[in-house]
Image (cartoon, rainbow, N blue to C red):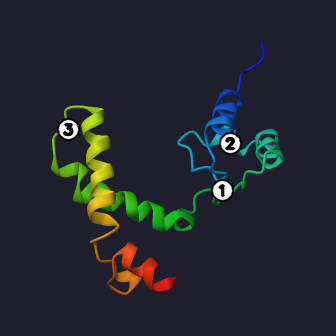
Amino acid sequence: MRLVDRSDFRFPVIVYTSNIKVLRRPVESAQYCSEDYRKLLSAHGFIVSMSRKGNCWDNAVTESFFKTVKAELLWRHAWMTRQEVEQAITSYINDFYNPQRLHSALQWKSPLDYERNAA
């Protein structure tokens, strides 16, 4: 009996439905580290980027962002549906986090203001 790698099924969906050529860190990361899978990604022009095992600092900015979203939005409400959560997160990012929320790492500017000044 051959074990089936679920990433074999996910890859065609990613390739044919996305213009983005950088993949996010998956929850089930072991299968995404396989040499065959990384070669397949590279052959299709994807950039393979993984942090080292057990090193949270490689992903500190992303981890900090998700902690902020959870603390400032998600943990403060009792959500009834997935759609309600998705809409709230979209609104939080587009209407507050990017245009208004000041960040110490961005010289106390919002991400949009910082990006405009950097251009």
Query: Which residue shows up at 24% across the image and 31% down it?
Result: 81
Q: In the rendered structure, which disc, 3 or 2, sits on the residue that comes first in sequence?
A: 2
Which x, y percent locates residue 8?
Answer: 71, 29
Residue at image mark 2: 32
Residue at image mark 1: 50
Q: Quadrant of residue 54?
A: bottom right
Q: In the rendered structure, which disc, 1 or 2, sits on the residue that comes first in sequence?
A: 2
Mark 3: secondary structure: loop
From the viewer's perspective, is residue 61 above or below residue 12? below
Amino acid, disc 1 = Met
Q: Quadrant of the N terminus?
A: top right
Contact? badges 3 and 2 (CB < 8 Å): no
Amino acid, disc 3 = Trp
Contact? badges 1 and 2 (CB < 8 Å): yes
From the viewer's perspective, is residue 82 above or below residue 1? below
Q: Nearer the viewer, residue 29 or 79?
A: 79
Mark 1: secondary structure: loop
Query: Which residue shows up at 53% across the image and 42% down it?
Result: 27
Using the numbered discs, state the Cα–Cα distance from disc 3 to disc 1 in whole angstroms: 32 Å
